[in-house]
Amino acid sequence: MNCLLTGATGIVGSHILFEWLQKTLQKSSTEKLYLVVRNTNITAIQRVKKVLTDSTRPKFMERFTLEECLSRLCIISKDVGSLTQKDLKSIDFTTVIHCAGSTNLTHSKETKQQVYTENYSITEHLLKIVPQRVSRFLYISTAFSFGIQEKVVKEEMKNFKVSTFRNPYENSKYDSEILVKRLCKVKQIEYQILRPSIVCGRLLEAPFFETPKFDVFYAWAIFLSKYAKKADNQFRIWIDKTSGLNIVPVDFVAKAIMYAYETPKIKELNIINPTKISHKTYVGEVLRKFNINQFEYVSNKPENLNVFEQLYYKTIGSVFEKYITVPDLKFDSELITKLIKELNLDSSLGVSENFINLIDFSIKKKFRKSYI
């Protein structure tokens, strides 16, 4: 079963690539994976080679030569948005894993346009041009497409509507899911919607803590590394003390996606962590890591802000405000727990005990990107 993958040089997409290659090469399959990769300052094939040989790649990839990997891959040197029906007409694939997209969490008008173009419009374009022989479309969404709400979130919720989102990114993913379901029905394509939560570095297999990009919650550590020295007064940080972050390791996300790929009966899967990490636990640990020892958790945004507080709430605090100050999403974890047990993994996926290790690793790496 040949497959087309978008986003193969991204955080999750590259790990899907690694998992796909491992399974294919181990069983000596002749299956091909078509990668849509655009040229940048280097060619698309050079970008793919960089992903496959980078030191951050999983240890298991060392068992395969670059030539073996490339023998199972076909590179389409284009941006997904510029693909045409003619480009795909002669390519023999029946399944699509659409992982490309934007994860920009900011709130500006420009951001809204960007995330809707990269998440919604390009998904619509891809679905309209795929050949008739395509029978399955896997869409990589986000667990936060459910927005802000109090209901327990399940995989498939009939007539489920969301009216409140934390940012345009979440809204674009929600709308994209509706689009995928509608267009797949029209084109008689089976769909699978897979929703990873917040993604962190590798925790299941070596090299541990690695990620090609320190994204989302890592931005908090990036901010503190630059500005913590300005915090010479009491720092009042606004959090919901009863809530937490839902974080999943990138290697687990890739394994869950491959599990769904091999299990077509799964229509929707929330790739979440059954165990959240409490804000009041990790926030204090991270602040102390950057020598901010005078801090106070508050239940409302403070007034009469000092210099450091003004800087925080104007920048990174405004991005993460709706994630750490409101009640978190409550997920039904029955399906993902079954997968965790099947893979013989710890129920927390190692996140709780390794959160500070992840932060330490990002500091050690100076938050540098690798192949992205």
Image (spheres, rainbow, N blue to C red):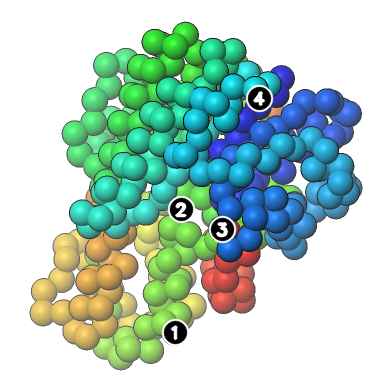
Please give the name of the residue rendered at 50% of the width and 13% of the height, measured from the top-left corner. 189
Q: How crowded is mark 2: few (under 14 residues within 10 Å), some or many (20 or more)?
A: some
Residue under circle 1? 291
Q: Residue 40 carries which label?
A: 3
| Residue type, label 1 | Asn
Residue at 86 percent of width and 46 percent of height: 67
- Disc 2 to disc 1, how far (Cα)? 21 Å
User: Where, quadrant-wise, is the C terminus in this rendering?
Assistant: bottom right
Please give the residue where the numbered disc 2 appears in the rendered image.
Answer: 277
Q: Residues within 10 Å of mark 1 (few under 14, many from 20)?
A: few
Q: What residue type is labelled 3?
A: Thr
The front one of 115 and 337 is 115
The residue type indicated by label 4 comes to Ile
Check the image and name the residue furthest to the front.
Answer: 86
Residue labelled with disc 4: 91
Q: Position of residue 247 (x, y in %)?
A: 49, 49
Which residue sits at x=61%, y=76%?
364
